[in-house]
Amino acid sequence: MMKTIHLPFRQKAILGKEKANLLCNDKYKKNIDSRREKIISAAIAIEETLNSIIMLTMFRENIKEHDLILSTFLEADWCSFGIKRKIFNQINQRFDLVKGKNKSDLESNLSRVMKYRNAFAHGAYELNQGVFYLKYFYNKPIEQKLDDEFWEKIETCFMGSFNQLSKLEIELIKN
């Protein structure tokens, strides 16, 4: 069994006048925190699938150097999700792996995955008249209401990206 560790945690929250209401909505806030963790974990899963697709297309011949390529290139701190997305788009353009509406849907979803991952990693919660909002910056300040419609959009975006990339990964492994 692994040792339990205790690490510092800091979550930005803009409480204002409704600080007392936040305590009443603690259960809802914990639910949001749980979803935040799931969003970041899902973004990592999508990024790892992108890594695999990049390896299976650009570095297929260098399979002996798989670990070296991963550790010095794809898993390096300078090789961000955004860079991997651009590499994938170049690979897709060259090899025509995803076509038509599926291609535009995937490109759009990958962009949103990165946007939402960053929003939840760096944004702040605000409780306003009993409703939680996520405040973040994406080309401009954004205030996103955290309601069922938004969570459904998140789920569709992340699952669509992951499913499409996983299907492509399996096809590349078979070939």
Image (cartoon, grey):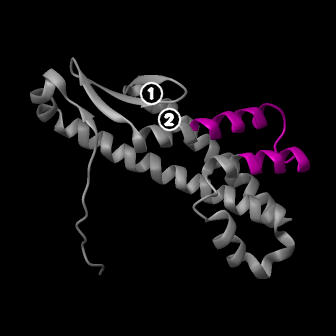
Q: Tell me the crowding category of disc 1: few under 14, some 14 to 19, or many 20 or more residues within 10 angstroms, Cα based.
A: few
Q: CA distance from mark 1 to mark 2?
A: 6 Å
Query: Horizontal placement of 46 versus 30: left or right?
Result: right
Residue drawn at x 78%, y 37% as measured from the top left: 103
Q: Quadrant of residue 109?
A: top right
Which residues fall within the magenta stretch? 86-112
Residue drawn at x 39%, y 50% is: 37
Which residue ends up furthest to the top in the rendered image?
129
Please name the residue shown 74% across and 59% down the image: 53
* Residue that mark 2 sits on: 154
Q: Quadrant of the C terminus?
A: bottom right
Q: Position of residue 153 (x, y in %)?
A: 51, 30
Specify whether residue 89 is painted magenta. Answer: yes
Q: Quick one: 50 or 156, which is closer to the camera?
A: 50
Q: Is residue 13 magenta?
A: no
Residue identified by numbered label 1? 150
> Circles 1 and 2: CB distance less than 8 Å?
yes
**Secondary structure, magenta segment, majority class:** helix
Q: Quadrant of the N terminus?
A: bottom left
Query: Given the image, on which type of amino acid does mark 1 rest?
Result: Phe
Residue 130 occupies which quadrant of the picture?
A: top left
